[in-house]
Amino acid sequence: MSKKLLRSIFNYFLLIVWCIVIIYFSSVKGNDSYKQSLFLVSYFQDFISYNHLKLIVLILRKIAHFSEYFILTFLAFNCFKSKKKAILFSLFFALSDELHQNYVAGRVMSFIDVLIDMLGSFTYAVMRGFYEKKSFEKKEKQS
C-alpha cells in the first residue's frame, strides 16, 4: 500500500473514532451527563456559590460542544480536503446528533447547541484559511 492510501485510511479512521466519541457523550442520560460535568468543577464548591457552579458547568459544556466540532471539522478536512465539505459534514453530524439526543432520557434537541457546534466548525475553517493564505504568501516570497 502506498503512503498516501495509508494516510487516507488513517484519517478516515480518526474521523470515525471521533464521531463515535461524540455519539457516546450524546448517549449519556441527562442527569448522568450533568453529574459528570458537575464533578469536573466540584473542587471549587467550597469557594463559590452553587449558582456560580451551575453557570461554570453550563459554560464548560458549551466549550465542549465548540471543541468537539472544531476537532470534527479538522478531521473531516483531513479526509475531504475541502473546507466546504468538512463544514457540511459537521453541520449534518451536529443536526443528527441533536436529533439523536431528543431520544435519550433527560436530553433534548437544542438549536443553540447546533449553533455552538457550527461556531467551532467555522472557527476551524477560518483558522485554516489564514494558515493557507500565510503558506501561499510564504511560497510566493520564496519564488
Image (cartoon, rainbow, N blue to C red):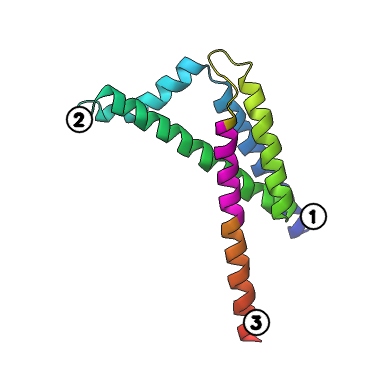
| Residue 11 is at least partly visible in this image | no
The outermost residue toward the right is: 1
Give the mark nearest the N terminus, 1 or 2.
Answer: 1
Q: Which mark is residue 47?
A: 2
Location of the N terminus by quadrant is bottom right
Left or right: where does residue 80 sit relative to residue 25? Answer: right
Left or right: where does residue 142 sit relative to residue 88? Answer: left
The residue lying toward the viewer, choosing from 1 and 71, is 71
Q: Label 3 to label 2, Cα distance in Å?
A: 55 Å
Classify mark 2: residues with Cα within 10 Å, few (<14), some (14-19) or many (20+): few
Q: Give, as a three-letter code, the residue at label 2.
A: Phe
- Do tag 3 and tag 1 residues touch (Cβ < 8 Å)? no
Q: Give, as a three-letter code, the residue at label 3.
A: Glu
Residue named by callout 1:
1
Image coordinates of residue 131 in percent, x first then y, are: 58, 65
Camera-near label (3 vs 1) is 3
Location of the C terminus by quadrant is bottom right
